[in-house]
């Protein structure tokens, strides 16, 4: 509280309360420049707690805005009375920042742990934790992995942000059974989606060692540390090795012959991650530029099915689609099938998943793209007849238009297929046994463009639509107009050329069954539907 400070009434003795613009005698009071204490008080009263996930430069900008608003609040001029004739106080403007703070790239990385190379030939689990990611990205990120170790060659997961602001870890399972020992690459892509389109993309690649079955633990650790260590400590013959301090060190510490190895990394207070039975490391995520127009498929998949609800004469009920570099043909199994194309014996009474179907191997034959075109290789116990002749095991044979493929060689008529189309980007197979009305197969190369002019097809396959695989999903090509249409469950197939009525697109190759694949995270566990 202070006395009246109006210069026109120097003898006024009325007191003026803080914040009042006139005294009790109705004399206007002059406004003085705010002090630093006034600015700080106004700032504390108007400042709100910033979000824990806000960017550093965003918090700095919010703090500067709050200071500027507080200064304007305290120094806002008070209109003077006309009778006073005093000029209104004009505050000194607060200096604005000259330029916006420069963009600082986010050092995001994947922390990979849980891998134990000692489990050669068995099930493996990778734990992937996303660290250092910008809070400005979407609250859910898509993780895509591609590797020869992963079932079907690829798998997709989602990183979800928790309420604390960090990211929920993702677990990826695979098996090194029947894999040659050596190094395998795993390619990682992390996508941030905005309105269904990819707005940001990060990539990295890391290598996993699959050791020999008879490799010792010492050999495995030496191989790993030879590529990951940056500090090596050894203590021999009763000597003492000592390491203090350090950040992000991968250590190889050895103590032999009564030696003592002491490691003290001066860890800060809090939780310390230690893994004695697993190997962990960090992989830096590199953000890459995206084209102006994204060409991502709206429904990516490597295996799907076209289901005809009312097939007419000569039409199949299911057209099964596969986009794989190597397509494995084998026995139908509901749980953990070993093949991609699951085959069953069809009798005059219908499909029989038991009986003669058990005389098919889990991994019976492989169809792949070879040097002389598409070829088939017998990898089974029961053999394959090609035009009535057994070619021999592990001897690839080039496919020919009209070739008759019979599984198996010991018992005839279990499954009989015919090559009805040789395409530049794939093969079409029709059944010519009692399952001819049930299914046929498109075996396509992933990310391959069709060339309709070079197609060789029988009349049975020439009436089928032209399909191909690109950008992670299946597409339809109208040969007359050249229009390409992405296939998804919401696509109206009856408006596309080559499709009959009552057709729909299913996301799984066997939508009429409940196929469970527990190796890895790719589960074909579609809802049971009537055949």
Image (cartoon, helix red, strand yellow):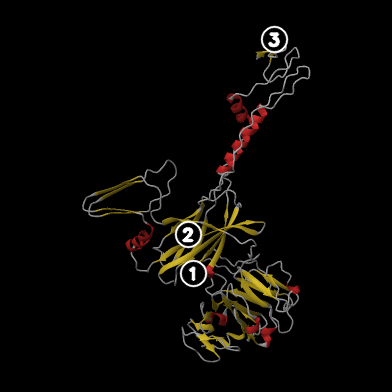
Could you tell whether 195 is left or right of 282 in the image?
A: right
> From what the image shows, is residue 380 above or below residue 446?
below
Residue at the outermost right position: 82
Quadrant hosting residue 301 = bottom right
Q: Residue at x 52, y 83 (%)?
A: 376
The residue tagged 1 is 148
Of labels 3 and 2, earlier in sequence is: 3
* Residue behind mark 2: 126
**What is the C-alpha distance between the residues marked 3 and 1?**
92 Å
**Figure check: 277 above or below 334:** above
Reading the chain from its start, which is encountered first: label 3 or label 1?
A: 3
Q: Secondary structure at mark 1?
A: loop
Judge depth for marks 3 and 1 and give the one in front. 3
Going by the picture, which residue comes out furthest to the left?
Answer: 237
On the question of residue 234 being in view, the answer is yes
Q: Can residue 509 be seen by looking at this rendering? A: no
Q: Are marks 3 and 2 in contact (CB under 8 Å)?
A: no
CA gap, disc 3 to disc 2?
83 Å
Point out the frontmost of discs 3 and 2.
3
In the image shown, does 362 or 104 lie closer to the viewer?
104
- Judging by the rendered image, the residue that carries numbered circle 3 is 10
Q: Quadrant of residue 302?
A: bottom right
Quadrant containing the N terminus in the rendered view: top right
Asked if 456 appears above or below 495 in the picture, the reply is below
Q: Quadrant of the C terminus?
A: bottom right
Q: Is disc 2 surrounded by few (<14), some (14 to 19) or many (20+) residues within 10 Å?
A: some
Q: Nearer the viewer, residue 88 or 384?
A: 88
Marks 2 and 1 close (CB-CB < 8 Å): no
Residue 163 drawn at (x, y percent): 58, 46
């Amino acid at each position: 509280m202070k006395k009246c400070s109006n210069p026109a009434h120097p003898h006024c003795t009325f007191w003026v309360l803080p914040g009042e613009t006139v005294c009790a005698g109705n004399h206007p009071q002059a406004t003085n420049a705010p002090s630093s204490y006034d600015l700080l008080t106004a700032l504390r009263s108007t400042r709100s707690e910033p979000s824990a996930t806000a960017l550093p430069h965003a918090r700095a900008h919010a703090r500067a805005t709050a200071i500027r608003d507080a200064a304007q609040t305290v120094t806002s001029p008070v209109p003077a009375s006309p009778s006073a004739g005093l000029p209104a106080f004009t505050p000194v403007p607060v200096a604005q920042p000259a330029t916006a703070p420069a963009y600082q790239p986010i050092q995001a990385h994947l922390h990979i742990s849980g891998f134990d190379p000692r489990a050669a030939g068995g099930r493996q689990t990778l734990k992937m934790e996303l660290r250092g990611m910008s809070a400005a990205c979407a609250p859910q990120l898509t993780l895509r992995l591609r590797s020869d170790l992963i079932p079907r060659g690829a798998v997709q997961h989602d990183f979800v942000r928790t309420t604390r602001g960090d990211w929920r870890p993702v677990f990826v399972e695979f098996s090194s059974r029947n894999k040659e020992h050596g190094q395998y690459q795993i390619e990682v892509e992390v996508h941030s989606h905005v309105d269904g389109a990819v707005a940001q993309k990060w990539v990295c690649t890391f290598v996993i060692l699959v050791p020999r079955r008879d490799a010792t633990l010492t050999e495995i650790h030496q191989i790993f540390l030879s590529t990951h260590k940056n500090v090596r400590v050894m203590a021999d013959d009763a000597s003492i090795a000592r390491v203090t301090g350090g950040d992000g060190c991968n250590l190889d510490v050895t103590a032999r012959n009564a030696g003592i190895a002491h490691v003290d990394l001066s860890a800060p207070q809090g939780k310390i991650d230690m893994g004695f039975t697993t190997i962990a490391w960090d992989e830096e995520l590199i953000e890459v530029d995206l084209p102006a127009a994204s060409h991502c498929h709206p429904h990516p998949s490597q295996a799907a099915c076209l289901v005809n609800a009312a097939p007419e004469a000569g039409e199949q009920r299911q057209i099964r689609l596969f986009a794989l570099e190597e397509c494995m043909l084998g026995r139908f199994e509901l749980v953990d099938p070993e093949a991609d194309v699951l085959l069953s014996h069809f009798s005059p009474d219908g499909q029989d998943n038991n009986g003669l179907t058990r005389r098919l191997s889990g991994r019976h034959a492989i169809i792949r793209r070879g040097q002389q075109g598409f070829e088939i290789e017998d990898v089974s116990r029961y053999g394959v007849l090609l035009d009535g002749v057994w070619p021999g095991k592990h001897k690839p044979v080039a496919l020919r238009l009209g070739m008759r493929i019979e599984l198996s060689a010991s018992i005839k008529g279990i499954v009989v297929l015919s090559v009805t189309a040789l395409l530049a980007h794939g093969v079409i197979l029709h059944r010519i046994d009692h399952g001819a009305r049930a299914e046929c197969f498109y075996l396509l190369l992933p990310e391959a463009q069709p060339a309709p002019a070079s197609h060789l097809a029988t009349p049975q396959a020439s009436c089928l639509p032209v399909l191909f695989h690109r950008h992670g999903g299946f597409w339809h090509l109208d040969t007359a107009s050249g229009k390409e249409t992405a296939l998804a469950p919401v696509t109206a197939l009856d408006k596309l050329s080559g499709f009959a009525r009552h057709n729909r697109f299913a996301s799984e190759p066997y939508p009429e069954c409940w196929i469970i694949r527990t190796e890895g995270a790719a589960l074909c566990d579609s809802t049971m539907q009537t055949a």
